[in-house]
Structure formats: structure tokens, C-alpha cells
Amino acid sequence: MTQETIVAIAERAIWVILLTSGPLLILALVTGLAVSIFQATTQIQEQTLAFVPKIVAVLVGIVFFGPWMLAKVTSFASDIFENLGRYVG
């Protein structure tokens, strides 16, 4: 296994991680921003108000994006396992 192969596998792994985690992170960011703006305008400083909507948004995102995320990760894993002989040998 050459250094170029290891770097290519690591680069693809990072790309898959960014693609699969991106939608959930964006949902959490947008929800957190909306809750922060709501708290600032209404002057409600309840701690649970910041976390519960983000958790709900991420759970809804997992339900919505879950099959696509699973397909991306399993495609990457199956590609690694199918080409394992080529990578090692």
C-alpha cells in the first residue's frame, strides 16, 4: 500500500464524513440561530429552550436524510472491502 493510496482513501473518507454530517450540522446551526434570535427578542433565557429544538431538528433530519447517509457510508465501506486486495497487495 503506497502513501498515495492511503492519502486517497483518507481523503475520500473525510469527504464522505463531511457529506453525511453536513445536513445535520446545518440543521442544528439554523435551528440554534433561530432559537437564539427568538430568545434575544423575547428575553426568555431558558436553558432547555436552546437544546430541545436542536435535538428535535436533528432527529427529523436523521429521519429525512438517514437513508441517503446510510447509502453513502455503505457505498464507501463496500468499495473499501471490494478493493482491499488491490490496496494491500
Image (cartoon, rainbow, N blue to C red):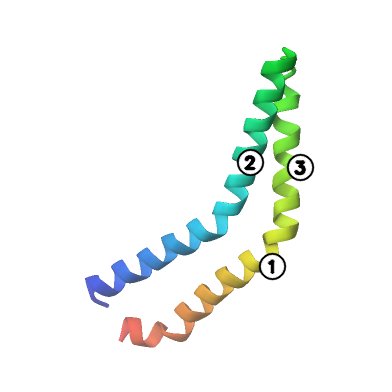
Quarter of the image for residue 14 reads: bottom left
Q: Looking at the image, how many numbered discs can be counted on the residues?
A: 3
Query: The residue tagged with tag 2: helix, strand or loop?
Result: helix
Side of 72 where 15 appears, left or right: left
On screen, 50 above or below 3?
A: above
Sort mark 3 into few (<14), some (14-19) or many (20+) by Cα contacts within 10 Å: few
The residue positioned farthest toward the front in the image shown: 41
Check disc 1 and report the residue beneath it.
67
The CA span between labels 2 and 3 is 9 Å
Q: Indicate the amino acid at tag 1.
A: Pro
Sort mark 2 into few (<14), some (14-19) or many (20+) by Cα contacts within 10 Å: many
Side of 49 where 37 appears, left or right: left
Residue 43 badge: none
Side of 64 where 88 appears, left or right: left
The CA span between labels 3 and 1 is 18 Å
Among the two numbered marks 1 and 2 on one chain, the one whose residue lies closer to the N terminus: 2
Q: Quadrant of the C terminus?
A: bottom left
Q: Indicate the amino acid at tag 3.
A: Val
Q: Residue at x 64, y 45 (%)?
A: 27
Q: Residue at x 24, y 72 (%)?
A: 4
Check disc 2 and report the residue beneath it.
28
The CA span between labels 1 and 2 is 19 Å
Q: Nearer the viewer, residue 35 or 72?
A: 35
Among the two numbered marks 2 and 3 on one chain, the one whose residue lies closer to the N terminus: 2
